[in-house]
Amino acid sequence: MANTYYVSNTGNDTNDGSINTPFRTIAHLLSIIQPGDNAYIRSGTYNLNQSTSTSGTQNAPIHISAYPGEHPVLVGSGNISNGDMFRLRHNWYILKNLEFKDGTAGLRITSNASHDSIINCQSHNHYYNGYYLAGGASYIHFVNCDAYDMYDSGSNGGNADGFGINGQNVPPGPGNTFTGCRSYHNSDDGFDVWKAAYPVEFDHCYAFDNGHQDGDGNGFKLGINETQNDKHILKNCMAWNNKQNGFDYNDNSLPQSLYNCTAYNNFRNYKFSNINGGPTTDDIQNCISAIPQNPDILLQSIIDQNTNSWNLVSPNDPNIVTDNFISTDDTVISGARNSDGNIPDSDFLKLKSTSTFIDAGIDVGIAYNGTAPDLGAFESAPMSINAQNSSYTLRIYPNPASNYLMIQSTNNSDKTIKISSLSGQILLHKKSLKKSIKINTTNLPTGVYIISIQNKGVIENKRILIQNN
């Protein structure tokens, strides 16, 4: 039978870990927690230097999260080169609403750890990376996580990335994904995928204001290839105000896939140079480059040269911003998240209704409105969803979901519902006329899925996280 434990600064490790008599330390919790157990950390500061000791299972993952409405912080002994970090070395963990700060690194996932989910976490002010994946770490899913203010004084900022997915010695494994994550104001790079050995997928991730002191300052660095599998996928990602390149191939000789990405006001927005021995053909489609400080380098062959902004408008056209974007104010998108971990909606780099980039793309498998996809990270809203009912709305909740998922709409028209794995395997396919539909998800292992709903000619895709107890 699964247990529920609590940890509090006012507790004692000789207690039973109940809500009224909690443990005092996370270290003690990690020494006794078992598959299927849940743990809640109360507000306060705790030692960052922790290491897992046992794994959960597919049907009984281990949950460790902040107590609802409270804010625990795991604090290291300072920004030093050889000190504290949280070491996640085991499988099937769900870490949620935790903050890691002031260590050598924040969260380090190695030792062939797999199928871990990191949700709504913050990592900042470390000597090296905020989050680091290596040593065979595989099928790790980051959702709505932030990494910021890393700085390593030993190289004056040259080795401190927000997210590092790379193999200095032993590379990560397959299946690592990042959704809704932000990396900013780090001395080196935002997201660094160097010798990752397998494809890494980024979806709606943002990198901005990276690079200070002697750090490189790339938004997304796509890494030199360790194997023939270093072919990374970026969807609806954005890079702006970075010291170096927004999107950088970093000597990777393998094809990279960038779909509906936006780069604005970086030193160079895109750098994809020729490779010694012959150019790669990169799949860069529906992307926008606006106001690079220096010309983009796009010397590699690109699939379908007519589906990016630079095929329509020069990136340095004096009117590219005023003609196409509602706003270049990033105050909201770079600020505090909503209570559910999502980034508040804003007009930053969204397209005007008169933009040249609306309906200028091609179908790359991402849902769109109108006659064709828009260019850039944000698809503009349709003028109306159908002629008879412009007030149609669709809700999919809760997300994360546990045991069930609700779909509510304002009409009872025929809806086609699909739930797929990230690899594209369809796990559920059904039709319904109901306005309110409840889907049992208990047979789905904990993980990230895609739900697709087609209704009156409109298709909506959304990522959902299933967390079954």
Image (cartoon, rainbow, N blue to C red):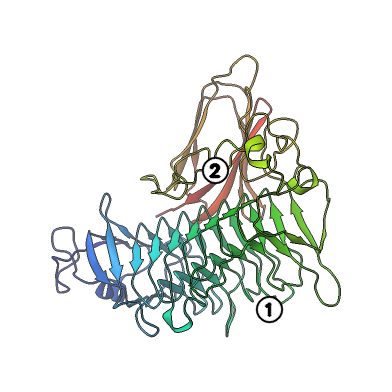
Residue 139, can we see it? no
| Residue drawn at point x = 45 percent, y = 58 percent | 145
**Mark 1 crowdedness (10 Å alpha carbons): few <14, some 14-19, many ≥20:** some
- Nearer-the-camera pick, 78 or 271: 271
Residue 156: x and y in percent read 47, 79
Please tell me whether residue 25 is drawn above or below residue 168 in the rendered image.
above
- Nearer-the-camera pick, 36 or 77: 77
Q: Considering only order in the chain, which callout, 1 or 2, is on the residue closer to the N terminus?
A: 1
Q: Which residue is mark 1?
A: 226
- Nearer-the-camera pick, 360 or 26: 360
Kind of residue sitting beneath label 1: Glu
Please tell me whether residue 225 is drawn above or below residue 236 in the rendered image.
below
Residue 149: x and y in percent read 42, 66
The N terminus, quarter of image: bottom left
The C terminus, quarter of image: bottom left
Q: Residue furthest front?
A: 318
| Residue drawn at point x = 62 percent, y = 61 percent | 267
Helix, strand or loop under label 2: loop
Residue 178: x and y in percent read 54, 59
Residue 179, can we see it? yes
Residue 87: x and y in percent read 40, 76
Q: Which residue is mark 2?
A: 328
Which image quarter: residue 77?
bottom left
Helix, strand or loop under label 1: loop
Which image quarter: residue 416?
top right
| Residue drawn at point x = 65 percent, y = 50 percent | 291
In the image: residue 447, left or right of residue 40: right
